[in-house]
Image (cartoon, helix red, strand yellow):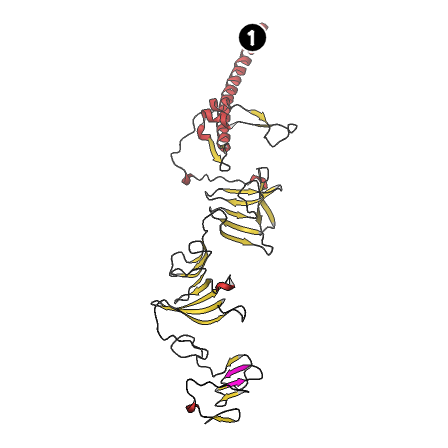
Amino acid sequence: MSYIGTKPVDFNDVTEAQTFGVTGDLTVDTSTLKVDSANNRVGVGTTSPETPVEIRTTNKLGGTFTGTVDGEGLRVTQTDYTSGNFVSLLEAPFDDSQTAPNVRIGAMFDGSGANLAFGTSNSYGSGITSEAMRIDPSGNIGIGTTPASGVRLDMRSDATANIADFRNANSAGFGLYVAAGSGSSYYAFRAADKDNAALFTVDSDGNVLTGKTSTSVSVNGALVNGNGQYFSTTAGANTYHYYDSSNSRYNFYVLGNGGIANYSTNNVALSDQTEKKNIVTAASAWDDVKAFSLKEFHYNFEDDADPKRLGVIAQDIQVNHPSLVTSFKIDDETTKLGLAEQQLTWMAIKALQEAMAKIETLETKVVSLETQNADFETRLAALEAG
């Protein structure tokens, strides 16, 4: 015999068509089930539930989370398993007036194992509108997508536009993998500061930008474009610095005007004999150097009142010595010519050596003539004295 309140009830006499109500608390076998009517709480395994529903039980899993041991919490089972079907474990609407759920945690069982799915809604009246995240049987997580095989964390803005993923050791190239979607508005990767200002960006064309978001070379910051070309722009006098921490000093600068500065011109060109082949004595550079057309000029960025510079024009050198001229792109539209000036220096030294040899020959001849002249003057003096 069971009691509701103080009245005995024989549940064997209750038919399926009958209903009954309970006023006040309901207790089943002391702590098996407790309905706290004063606080609208239900306790399983406790007579004093602290939340609307509380289950209190001894620990069953111990230190092992996996395996076949039954746990302590709620359990939802389906009576007719079909591969690929979802089972709702927990769901809620935004308000008690809403019948359709707006968030849901569910399970999906298929031939690969058990998946855990998380659903969200961007339209309350439409119920669950998105499977926002899924954890697959291997523990891989997909956000906005079902995780790809071998990808620990797969994040996408849609089914094809990959945002980022972390690959596990069973996938080629494991680690952080970032890929852009289609369209110019996508970034493969971007890091920003607390004010959302971009610090580091890899765009969908493979350009790497630091301190800037524009690929224009006129905007301050550094750019490595998809072709591997490097650009650095600054409004200050010095663009790059090399700092020697052991001596606490800056040893090398690339200046904003295109020059370089270091201590005592400490430039070293690799010149070891073991690095060279087909070595022969250089041919005469006399005529070549003699033909160089030295010019005075201003660079375009200089004022007309500035002192003029002395040098050569690449196009002039290119006529007779194209191997000394190099063309290079400074941006996608502009190509400029440059000179291997060190080679010009060596040609000038070769010509100087030739000039020195000629001078030395002339000096020898002058000495000989001076000796002959002295001898002649001695003989002449002797004749005049006789």
Q: In this rendering, would 95 be left or right of 137?
A: right
**Closer to us: 135 or 343:** 135
Is 228 situated above or below 24? above
**Closer to us: 102 or 62:** 102
**Where residue 153 appears, x then y in whole percent?**
44, 61
Q: Magenta stretch: residue 42 in it?
A: yes
**Where residue 105 appears, x then y in whole percent?**
46, 69
Image quadrant occupied by the N terminus: bottom left
User: What residue sits 49% from the left and 26% below the top?
Assistant: 315
Is 95 situated above or below 232? below
Q: In this rendering, would 50 be left or right of 276?
A: right
Q: In this rendering, would 260 be left or right of 183?
A: right
**Closer to us: 363 or 121:** 121
Q: Count of labels shown?
A: 1
Image quadrant occupied by the C terminus: top right
Residue 386 seen? no
Q: Magenta stretch: residue 257 in it?
A: no
Amino acid type for the residue under numbered disc 1: Leu
Give the quarter of the image for residue 169.
Answer: bottom left
Farthest residue, direction right = 305
**Residue bearing the label numbered 1:** 380
Residues in magenta, as a range: 34-43
Which element carries disc 1, helix, strand or loop?
Answer: helix
Characterize the local packing of mark 1: few (<14), some (14-19) or many (20 or more) Cα atoms within 10 angstroms: few
Secondary structure that dominates the magenta span: strand
User: What residue sits 52% from the left and 23% below the top?
Assistant: 293
Residue 372 seen? yes
